[in-house]
Amino acid sequence: MATPLTGQQIIDRFELYTDDTTDLSSDEELIVANDKLRLIYMEQPWEFLRRKKTGVVGSDGKITPPTDFDELMENYSEDPTISEPLLKVIFIGSQKSPYFVVPMGQRNANQYSNVCWVDPTDGKINFVQSPGAGTTYEYDYKTSPDDITVGTSPALPPEYHPMVVFGMLIDEEIIKKSEKARSNMQDNAVQYQRYMKNLKLRDARFKLV
């Protein structure tokens, strides 16, 4: 199994590839690393960022997402022959009744009461007809990981941590400031895309039975 890279080890590898000629401080290099890591997280709803959330509906009749919430993820299919979930739902109550997630703009266009949406004004999950305070719920969501520090590691699977380094190496500002990065730009871009393609294939396998 691959060993996770810490923020400091990512910086060390980056400096090795550039001969430390970028004029960036370690703090600035860490900022670039987190910028590139954030782009990877935003690429798609990765399975490795999927989390299950359970709790009870609040006193206001709404659900307050966790602090690391990014977006809801597909977790339901009405057709049992389809292995991959196609719909986003909130399971409500002991019977786990599915409440379908719709865009906020469609909240009044649906004839059913078992509909909910994420309201961007308060960041909460709202219902056409609230199931009631204290009612249990369950849903899947994509987490938004914290930035890495010199002592912490990316939320990526460990074998893909080097792609953060290659992402840094193809940054336009890095290329301008490092002759070695300029000369290796194409190779670094190929390596980054190779990691990304493989990561997507890995992620797809987790969606299959």
Image: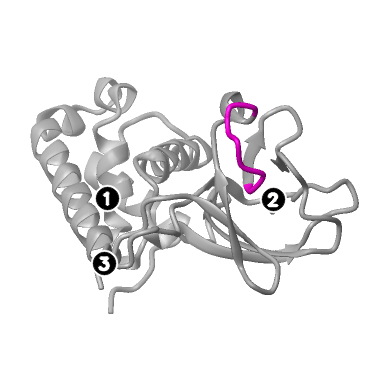
Residue at 17 percent of width and 49 percent of height: 197
Foreground: disc 2 or disc 3: 3
Quickly name the residue at label 2. Answer: 65
**Residue 73 appears in the picture as rendered:** yes
Please tell me which of labels 1 and 3 falls first in the chain. Answer: 3
- The kind of residue on which mark 2 rests is Pro
Distance from the alpha carbon under mark 1 to that under mark 3: 36 Å
Say which quarter of the image contains residue 116: top right
Residue situated furthest right in the rendering: 59
99 in magenta:
no
Q: Position of residue 46 (x, y in %)?
A: 37, 53
Q: Position of residue 75 (x, y in %)?
A: 45, 59
Q: Position of residue 36 (x, y in %)?
A: 38, 38
- For the residue pair 84 and 196, the one nearer the viewer reads as 84
Quickly name the residue at label 3. Answer: 81
**Element under disc 1:** helix
Distance from the alpha carbon under mark 2 to that under mark 3: 31 Å
In the rendering, which numbered label is found on residue 163? 1
User: Magenta stretch?
Assistant: 108-114
In the rendering, which numbered label is found on residue 105? none
The reply to whether the C-beta atoms of the residues labelled 1 and 2 are less than 8 Å apart is: no
- The kind of residue on which mark 3 rests is Thr
